[in-house]
Image (tube, rainbow, N blue to C red):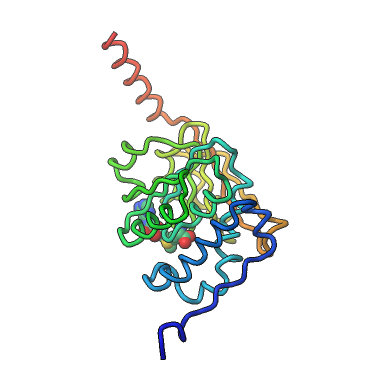
């Protein structure tokens, strides 16, 4: 028996994929191929995900583009094999995306995907979202996305310092989203995230629309103190 005898067939490209990826559909198909081959071989996705690669993963993440304006900067934390950051970058060529992922095996694959598909709107950074070095290297973005990374309180603690005041947290969550908001609202407010709500995207595109947990980054006392310190430093330099 050869390795090919064990290979699992990739789900065919659904017709609605054109609505999501437009003239960049070929890039999404290239990504599907890389996941099906190297992604499975290197243990980045399970073989059982391959027959539902489009509906559960690539389309489900690509529709996130509905919630993000052209010209935005996005940090995707805990990207793993590239979700949701890679499908989002393919769907939204005018959005600049930084994938933040700690594991070398995964960042190596992500670098290969970016090079192979020529995604000039994607940067890969290796590290943990909460590391000081990461925060000072990447700065802040308009939007911080994530899927399946951590429960809301922890996720908010990692994400908030990376979101510009006025920017948004967009976490792809399952059915637990509303419950997580109720449970963690107070803790999340302390790190500077308010106006928490649940919405859906991809309603006309995927059978199971993607559930998003949204939050807005508001200024905290800590932000205000940091701004005062920066102003004093600038004044001394003058
Ligand atoms: C369950 S996987 C989800 C991967 C991908 N987002 C997806 O939906 O397929 C969680 C990912 O979060 C990453 N991760 C864990 N802790 C992290 C942290 N502190 N900062 C950034 N990424 C982290 C892991 O390395 C892993 O790739």
Relative to 61, 102 lies left or right: left
The structure residue drawn at horizontal position 38% and vertical position 71%, both measured from the top left corner, is: 43
| Residue in the image at 60% along x and 59% along y | 59
Answer with the quarter of the image where residue 223 lies.
Answer: top left
Extreme residue toward the top, this view: 238
Image-based side of 3 in relation to 92, left or right: left
Q: Which residue in the rendered view is the most extreme toward the bottom?
A: 1
The reply to whether residue 91 is visible in this rendering is yes
Q: Nearer the viewer, residue 176 or 137?
A: 137
* Numbered disc total: 0
User: Visible in this render: residue 187?
Assistant: no
* Furthest residue toward right: 204
Give whichever of 145, 98 is nearer the camera: 98
> Percent x, y for residue 61?
56, 56
The x, y position of residue 135, in whole percent, is 34, 39
Residue 230: x percent and y percent?
A: 33, 20
Image coordinates for residue 71, horizontal then vertical, percent: 55, 35
Quadrant observed for ligand 1 in the rendered image: bottom left
Residue at position x 57%, y 44% in the image? 196
Residue 19's image quarter?
bottom right
Which quadrant holds the C terminus?
A: top left
Give 14 or 76, whichever is nearer the viewer: 14
198 lies above or below 8: above
């Amino acid at each position: 028996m050869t390795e090919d005898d064990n290979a699992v067939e990739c789900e065919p490209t659904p017709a609605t994929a054109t609505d999501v990826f437009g003239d960049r559909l070929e890039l999404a198909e290239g990504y599907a191929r890389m996941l099906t081959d190297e992604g499975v071989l290197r243990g980045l996705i399970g073989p059982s995900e391959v027959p539902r690669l489009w509906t559960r993963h690539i389309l489900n993440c690509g529709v996130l583009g509905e919630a993000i304006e052209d010209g935005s900067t996005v940090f995707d934390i805990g990207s793993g094999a590239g979700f949701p950051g890679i499908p989002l970058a393919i769907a939204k060529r005018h959005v600049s995306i930084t994938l933040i992922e700690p594991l070398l095996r995964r960042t190596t694959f992500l670098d290969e995907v970016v090079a192979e598909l020529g995604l000039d709107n994607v940067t890969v950074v290796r590290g943990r979202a909460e590391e000081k070095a990461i925060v000072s290297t990447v700065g802040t973005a308009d939007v911080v996305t994530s899927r399946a990374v951590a429960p809301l309180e922890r996720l908010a603690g990692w994400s908030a310092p990376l979101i510009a005041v006025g920017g948004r947290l967009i976490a792809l969550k399952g059915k637990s989203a509303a419950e997580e908001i109720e449970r963690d609202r107070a803790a999340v407010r302390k790190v500077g995230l308010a106006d928490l709500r649940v919405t859906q995207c991809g309603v006309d595109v995927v059978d199971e629309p993607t559930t998003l947990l949204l939050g807005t980054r508001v200024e905290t006392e800590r932000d205000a103190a940091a701004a005062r310190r920066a102003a004093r430093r600038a004044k001394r330099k003058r």
